[in-house]
Image (cartoon, rainbow, N blue to C red):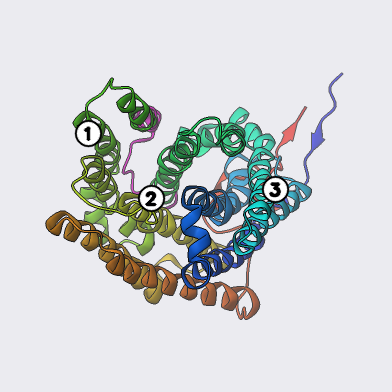
Amino acid sequence: MGLELQRKPHWSAGSYLDVVMAAVLMQILFFFTAFWIATSGEDFYQHNLEEINYTLRIQLGLGWLMCILAGIGFSILPLIYDVPGFEKTLMRVYVGMNIFGQIAITVGIISADLSIYHSLTTVGITLLSASVVCLWSPAITIFKNKSENGNKVGPFSYALGAFLPVLGMIVLLSWILRNNFSEALEISETIVFDLFFSLSMVAIIVSHINRRLDWQIIKPENTGKVFAIYASLLILSVVSDPLYERGDLSQRVVAILKLIPYLFIFLMLNPKRIISNVRNKKPYKSMIIASVFWIPLIGVASYMETMRYVETSGAMMSYYRWILIFGVAFQVFWGFIAYLHEDHKKTSAHSRKTHWFAFTAVNIGVIVTVYAMFASWKNGEVNENINRIGIGFYAISYFAILVFWIKETFISLYTWHKIPMFYDQYLANPEQGSGSHESD
């Protein structure tokens, strides 16, 4: 005898607001840490360069960037796939571990005491890794219940969540075993940014343009193939470095392997159709569309750095990472969540405004980064002063985003709807909310 149980409307639609505010606050903490290093902690930083660089980048990647990604996932995946799995307690646990992990890393760095730094950073990385691992259950729920609703995005929508526990364990083990394996930190950092976030940012781009805007830049039947090829190319680029160190690959082959994934996915995103739709004044999110055209520059910068055509110092982040994180990931994640927020306000797509201050600041910052890279290629010198100008523009864009979300969260003079426009088309019973279809 079967017993039918009707699920309650899913609470997590619109829960992005809590996670986004956590991300905004953690961005401030991240910049505070970087400012402290630049003004007061330079000696401690220079003596522990590799470890502090790693912890700062993990604080950025598994910290506030992952917060935004989790906020997107909690808010829209249960709507699209019409399943439960993102529980309120789980979100609180995730946000709590993520915030305290970042705070622990910051306190460890500004302590300027190596013993305290190692202890607190180990706690911080453990919490950040555990926060990612705890998202395994809802990610698997989505993966198991993938349906035709996800066809426009395909594996870009549901496959990445299954990798989260592995990502968390890689980061934690790399930190613990860093003294035993000299390349552990570099390899795990590469996996976080060059594999996971390179996939994630493209997944969000495809979700916005293919699903939300319905521009059909990638045909639904081809999304699986594109994902598989792109992921395979990224994996080849990740493993090319250790193969080069062993002498199995030449420097130029490695550089080409790092270039190809970004050229491939740029072409697959159909820039010609994107430009055509922009010219035809179809509605879109400026940050996301701009990010698409920075993607090939990630590959170009990676190629140039691998070939050692440009100079960087040990304290500098590589040029291609600046472009990847701020030119693409930063714009994609914040742009997507802002557009989703407008959907919850049910603002007409044709009347939405570009947040020009943040948009201009971040893109000028990327232009400065690209200029610094080509200037280094031309004169063969490290351009730290030019890079600082770029960082200044990134900081301005942070500030603009902070002001925007404070205004939208605490000074709200509009009607906010739990189920956003467009996404209610995926619900089995829209009047009951998501996760409302019946199961045995």
Cα–Cα gap, marks 2 and 1 = 28 Å
Foreground: 264 or 375?
375
The quarter of the displayed image where residue 20 is located: bottom right
49 over 227 or under it: above or below: below
Residue on which the image places disc 3: 123
Q: Is the magenta stretch mostly helix, strand or loop?
A: helix
- Left or right of 118? Residue 361 is left
Residue 352: tell me if it is visible.
no
Q: Which mark is residue 285?
A: none
Verify whether residue 220 appears in magenta.
yes
Question: Residue 82, how many percent across, how many down?
Answer: 64, 41
What's the residue at 54%, 50% (across, down)? 55
* Numbered disc 2: secondary structure: helix
* Numbered disc 1: secondary structure: helix
Q: How many numbered discs?
A: 3
The tag earlier along the polypeptide, 1 or 3, is 3
Question: Residue 363, how many percent across, how many down?
Answer: 32, 66
Instruction: Identify residue type, mark 2.
Output: Ile
Judged by depth in the image, the label closer to the viewer, 2 or 3, is 3
The quarter of the displayed image where residue 254 is located: top left
Residue density around tag 1, few if under 14, some if 14–19, many if 20 or more, within 10 Å: some
Boundaries of the magenta span? 211-229
Residue on which the image places disc 1: 256
What's the residue at 70%, 38% (across, down)? 437
Cα–Cα gap, marks 1 and 3 = 38 Å
Judged by depth in the image, the label closer to the viewer, 1 or 3, is 3
